[in-house]
Amino acid sequence: MKILGIVNQKGGVGKTTTAINLSAYLAAGGRRVLLVDMDAQGNATSGLGQRGIEQGLYQALADPGSAAQYVVEGVQPGLDLLPATPDLAGAGVELIDQADALKDVLAALPGYDLVVIDAPPSLGPLTINVLSAADALIIPLQAEYYALEGLAGLMDTVERVRGTLNPQLRILGVALTMFDGRTNLAQEVEQSARGHFGELVFWSVIPRNVRLSEAPSFAKPIGAFAPLSAGAAAYKRLAEEVMQRVEKI
Ligand code: ADP
Ligand code: MG
């Protein structure tokens, strides 16, 4: 079982969109996948049509041995979900001294090939739990001013976690998201990202595509909602790249 964290402390950069669509394509490719919604806003949970859920990851973190009862099975073919509920917002405080709570939850959920974790937009205790549990990180990077500067805090935190909780933690790759190749800015951000991170930057760039933003309100991943869209093609390619890299770790 390989555990992938989708992290960036900035909100609105495409973490949840990447988590949902990557998970769905990895599952469509024949892997048993668990998507863990680690954000109290629950966008991955509602984006897969799960509404009105009362118990989920928060209860699992409090009692890892009970985690299996909170998993929603088969939200898409081959894809299970450990949902977020609003009470997860309070877990930040409770997890300050418990960096391994998520790791314990996942240890209680065997049988998956891949776990994909949708992290919250902060570097607080929930994200520290993600960094502690993950084998590798995928960093969505939106093509905008200061996108790279914003990663400095994340990279410092990754270094700190490597030195203590999780020496094996690696960056699987940086995914450029909401990319509009017609703008100079987007091209400049791509150049500086490839200059700075080199081959870590995935070749598949995710375009700005309205179908990707519409899919969650239809409770579907892009492959089920608009399979012929540019967004679908891009996430399908990204999933293939991710699988190639995961097989090497
Ligand atoms: P995060 O989880 O990092 O906060 P989201 O994945 O929720 O980011 O994306 C923020 C907003 O941008 C959402 O409304 C989402 O639907 C939209 N969005 C994400 N990726 C794209 C894209 N490639 N094209 C168009 N809209 C996108
Ligand atoms: Mg999100």
Image (spheres, rainbow, N blue to C red):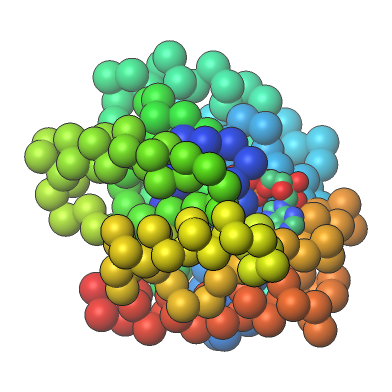
Residue positioned 46% across, 78% down in the render: 203
Q: Is residue 146 visible?
A: yes
Residue positioned 48% across, 57% down in the render: 189
Looking at the picture, does residue 205 appear above or below residue 219?
Answer: below
Which quadrant is home to the C terminus?
bottom left
145 vs 165, left or right, is right
Residue positioned 47% across, 29% down in the render: 122
Compare residues 71 and 12 and report the one nearer the observer.
12
51 vs 187, left or right, is right
**In the figure, residue 42 lies in which quadrant?**
top right
Compare residues 128 and 232 and report the one nearer the observer.
232
Q: Is residue 60 visible?
A: no
Residue 63, image x, y percentages: 43, 31
**In the figure, residue 221 lies in which quadrant?**
bottom right
Residue positioned 87% across, 52% down in the render: 217
Looking at the picture, does residue 224 appear above or below residue 158?
Answer: below
Residue 5, image x, y percentages: 42, 52
163 vs 83, left or right, is left
Looking at the picture, does residue 182 appear above or below residue 168?
Answer: below
Residue 33, image x, y percentages: 53, 68
Extreme residue in the right direction: 218
Marks counted in the figure total: 0
Residue 200, image x, y percentages: 32, 68
Which quadrant is home to the N terminus?
bottom left
